[in-house]
């Protein structure tokens, strides 16, 4: 969780991530942020995130992103 | 059968009656029949291509479904014996197999679109090269009549196919239901491009009649017709004059033409979408939003998030992400970070896909070099915007410019509008050469005096028409600003007393009848995006 928060706050220091459940739906993270974020997540957690995983449900909140990372680590 | 014709209104009333009178379990069949009746009358009987797309997409999704089922069963049996690397390899092998089916269906369907839409353009360019080289040979060129809505239903069907391929969507096993999803009549003229997950269930379920939904639907259709008939078709007269006679209308007239074309295109396209959305709403179906007040955008990326939203989202999900997350892009990004540093390096994986997207958006608009130039123009603006964002923001801080105030927001909107208007000149002028000379004349022969006196009465619209257009645009602007601040006009209106409501309804209807531009020459072909 801490590693993920560190990545997110470095990427977008202006966005309040904690408790936010509409990061994509409210347009707070755009497609360029997502590409950078996915690159960081893949490097940090040694996972592969394909385009099929880029759906709002996986990135709308920090918890959703964490769940995605954990699922892909288990796969 | 145009959206703004009496025939369409009669057709819609008939569809409504038949749909809601049909027993619940067969309502989707009524809708399916209505779609093909509409396609027959509006599309001139060009069923073949729609049927080919429907059959090929159905076939491919069924094959994928079978493969996915078999793979799941096989994987479940060996899963516990495989380590992480072996599981990855299994997945990669299966993806390869699926990809073959995907590629075959994508190539077939985009192949139809490419042949019908671009073979004339490609052929004439090849001949131009042959003639330039004095080879004395030529290839035959064909200009096909485009079937109604081909770009829209092709994109919608490919989106559905990719969702099935990605195992994000369970495919529909009933062929007629797939055909219904790919032919919903309100979308057939100019979109929006829907996702299966968003639209299909709404089409298949038996929707019940709702007075409130029907009322909101009719209101939206009237508003769409207002934008199309009162604003766009009137603005068109000015645009046709200025772009039709670029030697006469130079200097400031070019800026007037570009801005009025912005208004025309928005009125035409979003007006048509409102009519489609309203018609669907009457039948209990919500279509996806395609516009969100694009001319109030504060940057070019913001504009593209608000303009033709469903096309942008399609390219983002099915082209941009796969390209920018590909191994090639990621590697390029890592290398670029070493060479150019963290800021530019991080942007590398997105810059090239961004250019590719805008090239494709340009090509999507038409088979002409000017549309490719338009794509390149937008791609360049976005890339420059990203690269200059940090230095410009530092410069603004140094100069002490306040950026959290109304004046800065207004400046951002006007700046974006000016850049968008230049793009519109590129697409509306007869060719790249003409747009360059128009832009040149705008800068060199700027003369504000034409905005006063009779300067604006040279296009074929009289004083009364100019006033109608101006007031109508102001109404559109006022409504847009209200919506931007979160006010829902239709909900607010519904809360008012019946007398007030009906005064507004009658004013709207009389405005349409009195000030709408009608005539024999106005038919469905006049919806600009119908041709795409």
Image: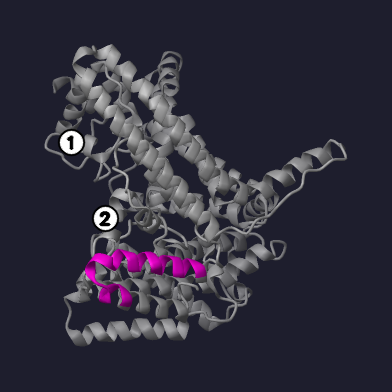
Q: Does dot 2 land on a helix, a strand or a loop? A: helix
User: Could you tell me if residue B532 is visible in this image?
Assistant: no
Judge the density around disc 2: few (<14), some (14-19), many (≥20) Cα neighbours within 10 Å: few
> Label 2: which residue?
B201
- Residue B24 magenta-highlighted: yes
The structure residue drawn at horizontal position 42% and vertical position 35%, both measured from the top left corner, is: B320
The structure residue drawn at horizontal position 47% and vertical position 46%, both measured from the top left corner, is: B56
Q: Position of residue B301 (x, y in %)?
A: 41, 43
**Residue closest to the far left:** A19
Q: Position of residue B338 (x, y in %)?
A: 42, 13
| Type of secondary structure dominating the magenta stretch | helix
Q: Chain of mark 1?
A: A
The structure residue drawn at horizontal position 41% and vertical position 27%, both measured from the top left corner, is: B97
Q: Position of residue B72 (x, y in %)?
A: 26, 28
Which disc, if any, is residue B124?
none
Q: Is residue B3 left or right of residue B214?
A: right
Q: Which residues are magenta?
A: B18-40
Q: Position of residue B396 (x, y in %)?
A: 37, 37
Q: Is residue A16 left or right of residue B204?
A: left
Vertical arrangement, residue B59 with respect to residue B18, above or below: above
Depth order, front residue of B71/B129: B71
Q: Quadrant of the C terminus of chain B?
A: bottom right
Q: In the rendered image, which quarter is residue A71 located in?
A: top left
User: Could you tell me if residue B440 is visible in this image?
Assistant: yes
Judge the density around disc 1: few (<14), some (14-19), many (≥20) Cα neighbours within 10 Å: some
> Label 1: which residue?
A61
Q: Does dot 1 land on a helix, a strand or a loop? A: loop
Depth order, front residue of B425/A42: A42
Q: Chain of mark 2?
A: B
Spatial separation of the CA atoms under disc 2 and disc 1: 27 Å
- Residue B479 magenta-highlighted: no
């Amino acid at each position: 969780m801490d590693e993920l928060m560190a990545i997110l706050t470095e990427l977008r220091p202006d966005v309040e991530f904690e408790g936010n459940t509409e990061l994509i739906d409210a347009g707070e993270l755009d497609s360029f942020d997502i590409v950078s974020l996915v690159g960081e997540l893949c490097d940090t957690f040694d996972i592969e995130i394909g385009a099929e995983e880029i759906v709002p449900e996986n990135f709308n909140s920090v918890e959703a992103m964490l769940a995605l990372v954990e699922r892909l680590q288990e796969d | 059968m145009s959206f703004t014709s009496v025939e369409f209104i009669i057709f819609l009333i008939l569809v409504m009656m038949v749909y809601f009178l049909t027993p619940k379990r067969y309502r989707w069949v009524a809708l399916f029949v209505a779609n093909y009746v509409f396609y027959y009358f509006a599309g001139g009987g060009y069923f073949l291509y729609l049927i080919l797309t429907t059959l090929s997409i159905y076939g491919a999704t069924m094959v994928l479904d079978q493969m996915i089922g078999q793979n799941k069963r096989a994987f479940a049996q060996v899963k516990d014996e495989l380590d992480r690397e072996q599981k990855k390899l299994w997945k990669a092998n299966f993806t390869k197999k699926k990809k073959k089916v995907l590629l075959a269906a994508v190539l077939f369907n985009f192949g139809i679109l490419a042949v019908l839409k671009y073979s004339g353009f490609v052929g004439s360019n090849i001949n131009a090269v042959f003639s330039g080289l004095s080879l004395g040979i030529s290839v035959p060129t064909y200009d096909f009549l485009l079937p109604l809505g081909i770009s829209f239903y092709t994109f919608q069907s490919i989106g559905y196919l990719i969702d099935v391929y990605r195992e994000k969507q369970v495919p529909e096993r009933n062929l007629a239901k797939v055909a219904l999803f790919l032919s919903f009549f309100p979308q057939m003229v100019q979109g929006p491009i829907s996702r299966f997950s968003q639209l299909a269930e709404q089409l298949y379920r038996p929707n019940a009649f709702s007075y409130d939904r029907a009322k909101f639907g009719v209101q939206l259709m009237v508003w769409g017709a207002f934008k199309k008939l009162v604003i766009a078709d009137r603005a068109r007269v000015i645009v046709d004059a200025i772009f039709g006679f670029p030697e006469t209308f130079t200097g400031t007239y070019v800026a007037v033409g570009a801005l009025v074309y912005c208004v025309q295109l928005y009125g035409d396209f979003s007006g048509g979408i409102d009519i489609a959305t309203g018609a669907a709403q009457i039948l209990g179906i919500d279509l996806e939003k395609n516009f969100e007040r694009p001319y109030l955008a504060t940057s070019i990326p913001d504009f593209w998030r608000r303009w033709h939203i469903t096309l942008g989202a399609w390219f983002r999900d099915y082209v941009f992400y796969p390209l920018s997350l590909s191994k090639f892009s990621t590697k390029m990004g890592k290398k670029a970070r070493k060479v150019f540093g963290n800021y530019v390096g991080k942007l590398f994986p997105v810059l090239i896909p961004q250019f590719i997207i805008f090239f494709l958006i340009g090509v999507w608009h038409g088979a002409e070099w000017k549309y490719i130039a338009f794509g390149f123009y937008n791609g360049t603006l976005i890339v420059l915007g990203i690269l200059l964002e940090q230095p410009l923001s530092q410069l603004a801080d140094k100069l002490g410019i306040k950026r959290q105030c109304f004046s800065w927001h207004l400046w951002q909107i006007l700046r974006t509008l000016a850049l968008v208007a230049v793009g519109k000149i590129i697409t509306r002028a007869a060719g790249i050469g003409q747009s360059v000379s128009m832009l040149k004349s705008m800068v060199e022969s700027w003369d504000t005096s034409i905005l006063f006196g009779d300067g604006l009465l040279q296009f074929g619209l009289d004083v009364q028409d100019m006033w109608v257009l101006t007031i109508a645009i102001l109404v559109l602007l006022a409504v847009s600003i209200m919506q931007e601040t979160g006010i829902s006009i239709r909900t607010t209106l519904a809360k008012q007393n019946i007398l007030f409501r009906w005064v507004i309804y009658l004013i709207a209807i009389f405005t349409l009848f009195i000030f709408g531009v009608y005539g024999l020459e106005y038919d469905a072909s006049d919806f600009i995006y119908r041709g795409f």
